[in-house]
Amino acid sequence: MMPPNINVRPVLAVAMLVARARAVAAFNTKLPPVAPAQHSNFNHVSYPLQTTALFQSSPKSNGSTATKPRKRRAPKKIKPTARFVAISALASAAASTYTSCSSEGAGAQVNAGSFATRHLEQDANYQSLEARDRAFARLLVATVERRLGQIDNVLKSCIKKYPPKKGKHSHIIQATLRTGVAQLLFLQTPPFAANKETVQVLRMNKPPVPEPMIKFVNGVFRNLSRPLEKESEDETSLFGQQLLKEKTSPRDNIAPWLLQRWQTDWGNEKTDLICEEMMPSDESLVTPRIDLTTKYSLGAACGINEDMVELQSLMPNLGEDSILLPQGSIRSSLKGDVKSWYKYDEGIWWVQDSSSTLPALVLARTLLDKYQEEKTRLHVVDMCSAPGGKTSQLICAGFGRVTAIEASQRRSRRLIENLSRLGLEEKCEVVVKEGQNWMPNEDQPVHGILVDVPCSATGTGARRPDVLRRGSNLKELLETQQMLAQHCAENILDVGGIMVYATCSIIKEESEDQVQRLVEKGNVETLPIKADEVPGFEDAIDDNGWLRVLPGTLDRELRSTDGFFVAR
């Protein structure tokens, strides 16, 4: 019995709490509680004091086994997909500095970015992909770049605020949207695959893209892939296809200032042909062309029978449907990595557009006709020579000395690599220097010089659609062209020597106008190009005797070729 004046309820409550805490501690430490001690004035159960925290494992003792700490799982490694690599390249290109036409208020799109294919080829993830996935990644990038104006117009039609505001994820969001639209509307990818696989890229991105942004992108794709009721077989079946048809035109992919310049220079009819060749209305008509120049091509074009026989013997191994073009190029029908093609490692051929062979062909034909058997004593210079296609042509012509001038250290490395693969590096001196600052030695007069000046490259728009969205400011390029051409004509070329001026631009200001300005100075005169010197391109010779190749304007296979200008 306890004394009647003591309230035991609070005391018992505290005792029970202490007992419960000690019991839990004993359970966690796997130690059984000791027997209760003798009670004193009230029923109190005592346990030994424990210093172990709640749910903390006890140290190993008395042979007991300690709980092993759990190993943390390594984060799951995400394998990059073709879509991931393509979108990453497009996002990187958009984030890089580039003077786009949109910055001047008249652009085909926003954030054109530098040429995304360059970013793609420099990505280690791209190189690790299988050949099929690499081809798909390249197709995605090429389609987005070629159709960028139309893609952005479709997105503007269904998104209230487009392009996305600048932020940490703006470039990856925009690149993902563009890639998804390209698949849905131009590549005819099934909507389920285009939506799911493209949205998944955002979840693979680092830093992680917030879930609300991912849901927003997914919502845009679902809206564009929404099927419409068809009243006839000719009507489109997706909402996005309807927007593409009603809100866009293939010319949206070309800067307005450039279209206007072409119309001024060439007229509406030829401008239409150029646009259709570079930007066909049906994406399925876009087929990548690969022209090859061989070590026998120039000789075959000059009428050397042995070289023609060698050239024809290569044809069957470079694709059953390969075509021998009139000026000696082979248009191959092979697919896949060119490094795996016949005779690549032996260095028999190199990739070079057919129209790009014309400047070296014109120079070589002129010098060979003029000096005939004395070609081994001639010194020929290739100005602005990287990546080396024209340099290789001049070496294969058999001139005694060939000097290649290249201002860019990076491009010169590629030039040397290409010459090395072809086994021609010992037959050429490569000089890394700005052309306007280079002078030959006094005992090495220059008999011929090829000046393929830096230009807007608008003639290559079918292969490099980014150039069709460039800015309209050509002032710096024009100054460089004029300075370089004048220096070559007045300070480098020997008296009586031959100079060929060339550009891959289809803008007169960079081409015809520059030659006219050089002639007006009175130090040089033009030598008209003859039809038999440029087989297949006879119709491209203008009234001045200069060669002007416009994409889409020649017959048959040569309809698909880069734009080029050549004057002698």
Image (cartoon, rainbow, N blue to C red):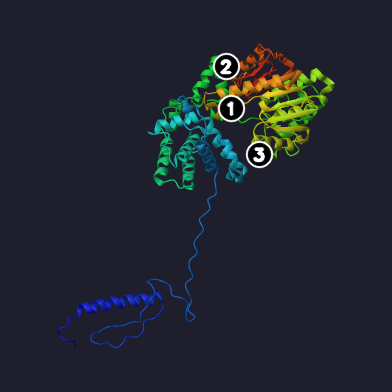
Q: Quadrant of the C terminus?
A: top right
Q: Are marks 2 and 3 in contact (CB under 8 Å)?
A: no
Q: Amino acid at mark 2?
A: Lys
Q: Which residue is mark 1?
A: 462
Q: Which mark is residue 270?
A: 2
> In front: 33, or 216?
33
Residue 242 seen in this snapshot: no
Q: Residue 322 at what x, y percent from top left? A: 70, 30
Q: CA distance from mark 2 to mark 1?
A: 16 Å
Tell whether 564 sits left or right of 373. left
Find out whether the residues at labels 1 and 3 contact each other: C-beta distance under 8 Å: no
- Depth check: 306 or 238 in front? 306
Could you tell which of marks 2 and 1 lies nearer the N-terminus?
2
Category of crowding for the residue at label 1, using alpha-carbon neighbours closer than 10 angstroms: few (below 14), some (14–19), many (at least 20) = many
Dividing the picture into quarters, in which one does residue 319 lie?
top right
**Residue 320 position in % (x across, y down):** 70, 32
The residue lying furthest to the left in this view is 5
**Vertical side of 518 occupied by 453: above or below:** below
